[in-house]
Image (cartoon, rainbow, N blue to C red):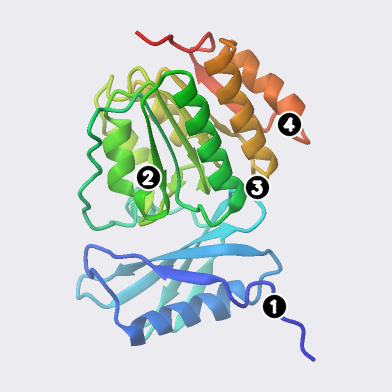
């Protein structure tokens, strides 16, 4: 009996673009087959899910597929570009693709952001609640924040989308936390990516006075980290390297517990939590105000 390939049943999601809101069954199958045959099946790295953005030529025909491959054991988004012909036949593959910000954004369709009855103090979310530790980490942070007296909004799955994250992050929150896959240029959400380009286009104090914590791989690097700080975040914390699924959420939970309930200093707390909960040092970074979290006004 033939052994089952580790990526045989990985879900491939074709995202909407500015050219096409939806892709028909035939096109979707061609795209999914290109990803499966050229990326997933040849790889020994286990993946959780793949998001695909189709890049089109001026005449509307396909030119390339940009695949955001979400790893199964870390919150890493590997980005690969496949140049294709008119029927999605693969002509060439660019591994470790850097790409343009336009590629990263994925041009998701506009959505109407959530409108809570009362403006929240804090928002915690994950676009991958099917990963048990991701959902548990978000729910834990929400519980800790609520018990500390803050108004909290939780965004899971389809609610962890680009429109909601943009709306919440520009709403002058006290804190915003996300658990999910990332890379040096952004984080991967349910329907597209939140990128350094979006942060760089915000006004100088757009994010003030938020403490932003992205439990994602590689996000504490340029261009994302400096763009978030430039947009006015009070503090930004995130993965400097590839973060393990499971242990990284324990650091996330520890951080919010200590800074919200024990009034611990944020910089020291992240280091302490990493030492207590994570298998290797220096995997997380924190910038901006490293002191105590703001009390309730």
Tell me which label, 4 or 3, sits earlier in the chain: 3
Quadrant in the picture for the N terminus:
bottom right
In the rendered view, would you say 236 is above or below 41?
above
Query: As rendered, which of 75 and 19 lies closer to the eye?
Result: 75
Residue 22, position as x, y percentages in the image: 26, 72
Residue 220, position as x, y percentages in the image: 54, 32
Q: What is the CA distance from the residue labelled 4 to the residue labelled 3?
A: 12 Å
Q: What is the CA distance from the residue labelled 2 to the residue labelled 3?
A: 20 Å
Tell me which label, 4 or 1, sits earlier in the chain: 1
Give the residue pinned by disc 2. Answer: 194
Tell me which label, 2 or 3, sits earlier in the chain: 2
Residue 17, position as x, y percentages in the image: 27, 64
Secondary structure category for the residue under label 1: loop
Q: Which residue lies furthest to the bottom in this view?
A: 1
Give the residue pinned by disc 3. Answer: 245
Q: Which mark is in front, 4 or 1?
A: 4
Secondary structure category for the residue under label 3: loop
Give the residue pinned by disc 4. Answer: 277
Q: Residue furthest front?
A: 147
Q: How crowded is mark 3: few (under 14 residues within 10 Å), some or many (20 or more)?
A: many
Q: What is the CA distance from the residue labelled 4 to the residue labelled 1?
A: 32 Å
Tell me which label, 3 or 1, sits earlier in the chain: 1
Q: In this view, does 38 lie to the left or right of 66?
A: right
Q: What is the CA distance from the residue labelled 2 to the residue labelled 1?
A: 31 Å
Q: What is the CA distance from the residue labelled 4 to the residue labelled 2?
A: 28 Å
- Tell me the number on the disc at residue 5: 1
Quadrant in the picture for the C terminus:
top left
Q: In this view, does 15 lie to the left or right of 262?
A: left
Residue sitting at 42 percent across and 53 percent down?
157
């Amino acid at each position: 009996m033939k052994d089952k390939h580790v990526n045989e049943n990985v879900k491939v999601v074709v995202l909407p673009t500015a050219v096409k809101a939806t892709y028909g069954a035939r096109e979707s199958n061609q795209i999914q087959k290109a990803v499966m045959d050229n990326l997933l099946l040849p790889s020994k790295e286990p993946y959780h899910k793949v998001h695909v953005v189709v890049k089109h030529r001026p005449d509307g025909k396909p030119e390339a597929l940009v695949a955001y491959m979400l790893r199964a054991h870390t919150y890493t988004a590997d980005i690969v570009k496949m140049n294709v012909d008119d029927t999605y036949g693969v002509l060439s593959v660019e591994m470790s693709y850097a790409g343009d910000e336009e590629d990263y954004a994925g041009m998701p369709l506009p959505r109407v952001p959530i409108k809570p009855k009362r403006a929240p103090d804090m928002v915690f979310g994950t676009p991958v609640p099917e990963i048990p530790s991701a959902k548990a980490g978000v729910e834990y942070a929400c519980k800790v924040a609520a018990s500390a007296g803050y108004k909290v909004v939780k965004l899971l799955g389809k609610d962890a989308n680009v429109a909601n994250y943009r709306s919440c992050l520009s709403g002058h929150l006290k804190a915003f936390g996300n658990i999910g896959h990332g890379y040096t240029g952004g984080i991967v959400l349910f329907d597209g990516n939140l990128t350094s380009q979006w942060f760089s286009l915000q006004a100088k104090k757009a994010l003030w006075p938020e403490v932003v914590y992205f439990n994602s791989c590689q996000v504490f690097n340029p261009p994302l980290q400096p763009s978030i700080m430039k947009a006015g975040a009070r503090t930004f914390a995130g993965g400097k390297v590839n973060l393990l699924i499971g242990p990284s959420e324990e650091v996330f939970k520890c951080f919010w517990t200590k800074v919200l309930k024990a009034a611990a200093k944020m910089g020291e707390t992240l280091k302490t939590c990493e030492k207590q909960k994570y298998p290797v040092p220096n995997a997380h970074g924190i910038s901006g105000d490293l002191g105590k979290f703001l009390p309730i006004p």
